[in-house]
Amino acid sequence: MSTETYRQMQEYFMHHLRLMHYPVAIRYIFEQEELDRFKRDVPHYVPGKALTFCQAEIGARMEGLTVLMEKDRLGCANAKFVFGWKGLDEAEIKSHMKYVRDMDQAEAFVRSKPRLPEGKLVAVVVSPLADAFAPPHVVHFYCDNMQAYHLAVDWMSAMNVHPLKPSMTMNSAACGGNVQAYNTASMNIFLACSGSYNAGKTERGEINVAIPGEQLVLVMERLKKRVDDHGGASITRPGQPFPGADICKNCPLITFKKAGAEEAQA
């Protein structure tokens, strides 16, 4: 797809779902040639200091920046493990002790995390969807509850998959949650981990939605069909433009009618 197509998709999702954050296009780079081409041809930013992956995403979703994250700029051991930039070691296991019963459980839980092939990833690029320089492997939405619900419903309908089976891990939300979507070629919904809540700045209680990049156009087509058919994106109140209007369904008291001529003259 062209850059213009990604820009239009971003605008459509942001307008109809009332998103606060730019959808984040995530591109995993496995070839040095692609990284060299990116560095040469694409204007981008790099972390001034080593950051966590969820902190790098702040630049994309809040500031509209294209951020290149290489191994030496990733300051999160959990993300390095998930990205295959380090193997399993005692320090990684011990870092999970505050979540679990004992070391054996910590090791088992860390081993069960989704991972990219060890030693294969060269770099990760995150950008607003509108500025995707290549087809994103995953598009990461930071949403409220009902925005996430609308995306999930449209994905399930578009992909003919039901029920959706989210996957959540300890201490690796943004890094592991998106790798899970990439590895399984399936949408993922997951909560913030303790790191992404604080360091990744999700104090508003955002919910994470990760959609494989190649499936996003199908989700948008499903959303567009609903908008065209009903006059708005809302599932909770069909025909209304605001997704998740916070009004009790079928409440006889919370209704509105167009003012008549006699009321307008009063």
Image: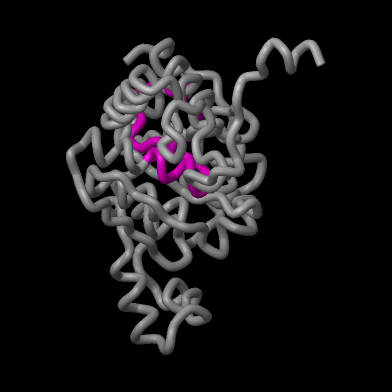
247 vs 120, left or right, is right
Residue at figure coordinates x 29%, y 38% from the top left: 155
Q: Is residue 81 above or below residue 218?
A: below
Q: Position of residue 77 (x, y in %)?
A: 49, 61
Magenta stretch: includes residue 5: no
Instruction: Point out the image quarter for the C terminus.
Output: top right
208 vs 196, left or right, is left
Residue at figure coordinates x 42%, y 55% from the top left: 190
Magenta stretch: includes residue 140: yes
| Closer to the camera in the image, 222 or 245 | 245
167 vs 47, left or right, is left
Tell me where residue 236 sits by quadrant: top left
Instruction: Point out the image quarter for the N terminus.
Output: top left
Q: Position of residue 133 (x, y in %)?
A: 42, 21
Tell me where residue 113 sits by quadrant: bottom left
Q: Is residue 131 visible?
A: no
Residue at figure coordinates x 34%, y 39% from the top left: 211
Most extreme residue toward the front is 262
Residue at figure coordinates x 46%, y 21% from the top left: 12
Q: Position of residue 118 (x, y in %)?
A: 29, 54
Most extreme residue toward the right is 266
The segment highlighted magenta reads: 122-151
Q: How many marks?
A: 0
